[in-house]
Image (cartoon, helix red, strand yellow):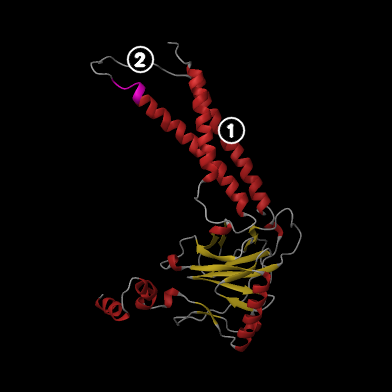
Amino acid sequence: MQQVPVSLWTLVAGIVVTAISIWIGQNHTLMPVQASLQAPLVDGFFNVMFTIAIALFLVVEGTIVLFLIQFRRRKGDDTDGVPIEGNLPLEVFWTAIPTVIVLLLGIYSVDVFNRMGGFDPAGHPHSAAHVAHQPGTALAATLSDTSEATAAPAIAPTIGIGASPQTLNKPADLVVDVKGIQYAWLFNYPDSGITSGELHIPVGADVQLNLSAQDVIHSFWVPNFRLKQDALPGIPTELRFVATKPGTYPVVCAELCGGYHGSMRTQVIVHTPEEYKSWRTENQIAQQQNPTQVVAVNPADLSTSEFLAPHTHDMGISAATLESVVMSH
């Protein structure tokens, strides 16, 4: 019986590995729903990296399993292995291929970063809304006066994700000043004087977030938008994007910022244009009637029982039981 050449087996294995890698790389469910214009760019890059990672995993682990079977020690075989030393073509191959892959991924990532607007913000001034912080209460972050919600003077060029090449030198449709504090996000709309603890935007609008931090480094992350940008004390940063799907999506602080870091969460609500107009009108009227409207809660100012109350309610623990446990400790 004629033996199948090793080169043919290698070709077949390469075709199988390539097919499996491409299928898994393009059909996984690791990422949340796309909800921004920038999300497909990030997902495309992620899928390429994941496809390459699957291929490398199959080649390396497949080779290990094959060698474990083919070159296993046979019963009664006490001889030494074949003294093989060095293989220049193989060493060049496994050095050159990863080098080429890394270079190509680097070029691809730069292109994605540029198309998302990563090279734009260097020359843009930043302005932050003035938001009063009232310490000593359980509901710490309040708006003292909507008339004071005006832009501060520009302090430095911004860094971050700015306008894409298609929107370069064009003003954003909506500008929101975002401030991170321990442990909440505050959103101020300079054009309307609205301040909120949630981000409300219309679908399809070119939105620019001017990010700042009051105390320590925070990181504004919306997984569904595939966007994350640090908010830095004293250094303005920018995040510009277009939401493409109405819905409610989580906003997470992705930078360890203190003891209550895990509770620094809010949400971005993407409205239809009609819904956003209605929300804006309602909130303008409400804040004119009550200029000290509470917009965020600082967990650091809550008692232990107050902070744990939402979680214990979900677990079926009564308020009296919770209070007794807290008092006993």
Q: Nearer the viewer, residue 315 or 133?
A: 315
Q: Is residue 311 magenta?
A: no
x, y percentage for residue 159? 64, 58
x, y percentage for residue 78? 25, 16
How dense is the environment of label 1, judged by Cα within 10 Å: few (below 14), some, or many (20 and up)? few
Mark 1, residue position: 100
Could you tell me the amino acid type at mark 2? Val
> What secondary structure is found at the residue carrying circle 1?
helix
Could you tell me the amino acid type at mark 1? Val
Determine if residue 152 is in view: no
Label 1 to label 2: alpha-carbon separation:
33 Å
Identify the residue at horizontal 57%, vertical 37% (top origin). Answer: 102
Mark 2, residue position: 82
Magenta stretch bounds: 69-73
Q: Nearer the viewer, residue 180 or 36?
A: 36
Dominant SS in magenta = loop
